[in-house]
């Protein structure tokens, strides 16, 4: 199992970014996939997840209405569309899945929201 995030960068407040998580070694449609983030000096927190069955989504209150998680089964990739970004969204963003009780994490991608 391997997860590789991309798409992070520097963006001004109010801007948008789309993060990608390319998965290999398994099929994402068979797993719940999630995005997490860790800001400097803070604990890692769940941002959003999408379930394997039905593709239901859920979001942290802090990003609800601004972020959208989605998946492309054909590309075996999960996305996080982030709009109306705020400085407090600055963090390293990680993709994660749990397979048979084992948590797999990507290496993370840095998102910096600053003017």
Image (cartoon, grey):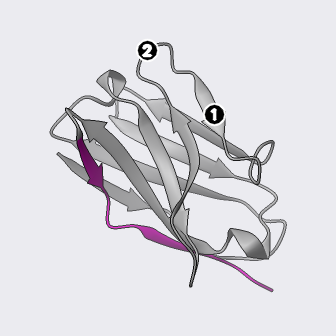
Query: What kind of secondary structure does the magenta stretch mostly adopt?
Result: strand
Numbered disc 2: secondary structure: loop
Residue 19 image offset from top left, x and y in percent:
52, 55
> Is 68 in front, or is 103?
103
Q: Which residues are magenta?
A: 102-115
Q: Is residue 9 visible?
A: no
Ranked by sequence position, the earlier of labels 1 and 2 is 2
The image quadrant that residue 70 belongs to is top right
Vertical placement of residue 39 versus 17, above or below:
below
Vertical placement of residue 59 versus 110, above or below:
above
Question: Left or right: 43 with respect to 14?
Answer: left
Q: Is residue 111 visible?
A: yes
Q: Label 1 vs label 2: CA separation?
A: 13 Å
> Is 101 in front, or is 86?
101
Q: Which labelled disc corresponds to residue 53? A: 2
Q: Which labelled disc corresponds to residue 50? A: none
Image quarter of the C terminus: bottom right
Q: Which labelled disc corresponds to residue 58? A: 1
In the rendered image, residue 18 lying in the magenta stretch gets the answer no
Q: Pointer 1 and pointer 2: residues touching (CB < 8 Å)?
A: no
Vertical placement of residue 75 versus 40, above or below:
above
The image quadrant that residue 109 belongs to is bottom left
């Amino acid at each position: 199992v391997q997860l590789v995030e991309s798409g992070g960068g520097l963006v001004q407040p109010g801007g948008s970014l789309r993060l990608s998580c390319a998965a290999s070694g398994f099929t994402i449609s068979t797993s719940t996939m999630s995005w997490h983030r860790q800001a400097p000096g803070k604990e890692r927190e769940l941002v959003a997840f999408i379930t394997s069955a039905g593709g239901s989504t859920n979001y942290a209150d802090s990003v609800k209405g601004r972020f959208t998680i989605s998946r492309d089964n054909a590309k075996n990739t999960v996305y996080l569309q982030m709009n109306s970004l705020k400085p407090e969204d600055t963090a390293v963003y990680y993709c994660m899945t749990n397979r048979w009780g084992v948590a797999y994490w990507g290496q993370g991608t840095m998102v910096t929201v600053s003017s």
